[in-house]
Image: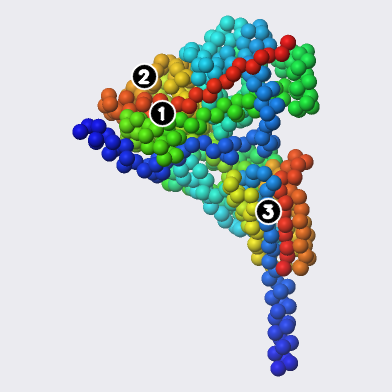
Amino acid sequence: MLSFALAISANVLAVDSPAFGNLSTPDVDDIEYFDDEEPSEREIELGKMLFFEHRLSKNQNQSCATCHNPELGFSDGLAKGIGSGGDILGRNAPHLYNLAWSAIFFWDGRAKTLEEQALGPIVSDVEMQMTPKEAVGRLKKIPFYDKEFKEVYGSVTFENIGRAIAAFEKTIISDNSAFDQYLAGEKQAMSHSAIRGLQLFVGKARCVKCHDGANFTDDSFHNIGIEDNDEGRFLIDPNSKLKGAFKTPGLRNIIMSAPYMHDGSLASLEEVVEHYDKGAVNVKDVSPLIVPLNLNPQEKADLIAFMAALTDPVVIQRPKLPN
Amino acid sequence: MKQYLLIGMSLCSIFSAQGAVLTGELEFVKKPSFVGVVYAKGGKGPSAAELDQSNKIFDKKAVVIGKNGEITFKNSDEFQHNIFANDPNSGVKFDVGLMNQGQTTKVAANWSENTLTRIGCKIHPKMRSYIANVNSDAYQVLPFTKKQKVYPIELDVGTHTEFVLQIPKYDPVELKLAKGQQTSVDVMYKGKKRATLKLALN
């Protein structure tokens, strides 16, 4: 009887139901490329090598892929990462899925383009600890890179390093999850629990207030009630009044990139759902969007099942780096 | 009878002199840009324009306003918004501050004419629209979509003979047409052809 009821419930949600709001499958036609030019295969391949290039860190022991490890959901499995010199970093390493559609970057939105973002960790004092001059100098000494940069861009420059890495990162696309198949009309693609989770996601649980759009992010900043004295967006734009607010992370493949939140303080999606269920009552500067949800245990499980239905791993073959 | 014919010819001539229509199309080579504005040079431009926000988007991709006109920004959304401009291309900067649902605020467009200024929301960086500040009474906003490459243009331009096409970041196109004349020009961005603009004045 229960399974019959669940089956009915699964079928009452029309695939193109407006109840889904803006949730959708991302459209590659909506990607905005540098200078409106889609990167060439050669540029993407160059960017991929640089993404894995440990010589872009001071001690030649780290690359972008250290904190954004493809095998760890393009994160690192740590609450807070470790820099080239052994320092513990300030925030959790976010995943990189579907950043091609993003409009602002870093937890605090301090970079306006992925090209700019890609260069940030290379010259960060605590991350890869390079200077632009050192980074360019190292690559110029490697004949393969010197030649490739000349062929693709005309020369090795710091800006072109960012362009190449961003060109690669924009290919990290996840768009065929069970949810996408469900949206496309495959009603069996998601479990009954995940379908109920979807209803909760856009309804009672209010997740879609921030995690909306094709990539489950509004690209906006919200104080969600994590108390760690990090002022987040406010440090970048004091006029914004967004104290303690951080960028809404996209949720595609989110089950692969634990731990969660900007400080990595929540170890599992279960803890995340518990956090939102409680509603961060009486937390200073918390967004008015965060309120107690009164979810029951089944509803919490359904939400997690729905987030798991957003999984479509992106497998990356690590490149052989040039001598 | 002869008199009626003369009056008729004369009316036709006046009508034809005052009622020219600019027609044509803009065809993109690849993916279209975000929005374009085509207009005839001359006139005052609108003294008022309105731009609303709902579902985390602006309701128009561009609004047209004349010099010293006033733009009314509305927030019909359930979310707070904060409209701002900081556009190095037009030199326009303003920040209307936080707007709650139902709130309205006005901004005087007292900056340079013939500019296209990008505006956004500080809270929702994906939101964007443009303010076209033009001294023109004959204009057409072309809201582009990614799937459509060709956009028709039809504009009553009166006696005007100078026309402008502005697309954000692209080189502006300015041209003169005599009545009965047609032309085709390349629309460029960073030295590369991005579209073809075909116009005829009749």
Chain where mark 1 sits: A
Q: Chain of mark 2?
A: A
Instruction: Nearest to the eye among marks 1 and 3: give it.
Output: 1
> In the image, B96: left or right of A16?
right
Q: Is residue A109 visible?
A: no
Secondary structure under badge 1? Answer: loop
Q: Are marks 2 and 3 in contact (CB under 8 Å)?
A: no
Q: CA distance from mark 2 to mark 1?
A: 18 Å
A104 relative to A228, above or below: below
Q: Residue furthest left?
A: A1
Image position, residue A89 (x, y; %):
54, 12
Of residues A229 and A261, the one nearer the viewer is: A261
- For the residues beneath circles 2 and 3, the answer to whether they share a chain is no
Instruction: Give the residue at mark 2.
Output: A271
Q: Chain of mark 3?
A: B
Compute the Cα span from label 1 to label 3. Answer: 42 Å
Which image quadrant for residue A187? top left
Q: Return the residue at label 1.
A: A309
The residue under the point 36% across, 25% down is A304
Amino acid at the residue labelled 1? Ala
Q: Nearer the viewer, mark 2 or mark 3?
A: 3
Q: Are marks 2 and 1 in contact (CB under 8 Å)?
A: no
Residue B102: x %, y % from top left: 43, 46
Residue nearest the observer in this picture, B199 or A84: B199
Q: Quadrant of the C terminus of chain B?
A: bottom right
SS label for mark 2: helix
> Neighbour class for label 2 at 10 Å: few (<14), some, many (≥20)?
some
**Mark linked to residue B26:** 3
Q: Residue furthest bottom?
A: B1
